[in-house]
Structures are given as structure tokens and as C-alpha cells.
Amino acid sequence: MPSEITNSEEFVRMSERASECRVKRLKDIVKLKLRTASRLYTIRLDPDKAAEVLKQVKCEVIEA
């Protein structure tokens, strides 16, 4: 089961351990999904905030 994160700073910290970050753009939100060795972490953000977070992510970004 994936775990949802609400804090964007925590999401960026977890990206150091992740192998990839998938981006799913919906109508009014953006879902970011971090794949680590043991778990999938997700966060839902508005498009402006998601763009800022994606600049800080420290793993490969894949647009889905």
C-alpha cells in the first residue's frame, strides 16, 4: 500500500533514497510518486507548488 505524505520538505528528503519520481498531472492537482526499495510514497500538490518541489527532487523524474 502506498503512503501519502502531506509535507513537501519531507517528500524532498525522501527523494534522496528513491530510485524514481513519477509525475501524474490531473485537471487541478499534480500527484508525485516516489518509489523506494520498500514502499511507494505519494503527495498531491497544486501545479505551482509541484513545479517548485520537482526542482528540488534528487532522483530521476518521469512524466507519466
Image (cartoon, rainbow, N blue to C red):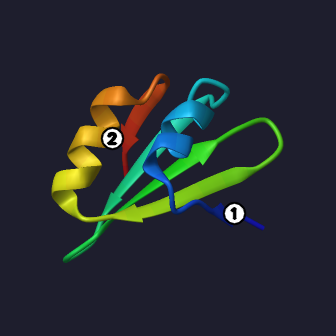
Q: Amino acid at mark 1?
A: Ser
Q: Residues within 10 Å of mark 2 (few under 14, many from 20)?
A: some
Q: Is residue 5 above or below residue 36?
A: below
Q: Residues within 10 Å of mark 1 (few under 14, many from 20)?
A: few
* Front in this rendered view, residue 49 or 27: 49
Left or right relative to 23: residue 40: right
Q: Is residue 23 above or below residue 29?
A: above
Q: Which mark is residue 53?
A: 2
Q: Which mark is residue 18?
A: none
Question: Which residue is pictured at 83% across the width and 43% down the height?
Answer: 38
Question: Which residue is pictured at 71% across the width and 38% down the height?
Answer: 36
x and y percentages locating residue 7 in the rendered image = 50, 55
Question: Which residue is pictured at 28% across the width and 30% down the height?
Answer: 55
x and y percentages locating residue 9 in the rendered image = 47, 41
Left or right relative to 25: residue 18: right
x and y percentages locating residue 8 in the rendered image = 44, 49
Q: Which mark is residue 3?
A: 1
* Front in this rendered view, residue 22 or 11: 11
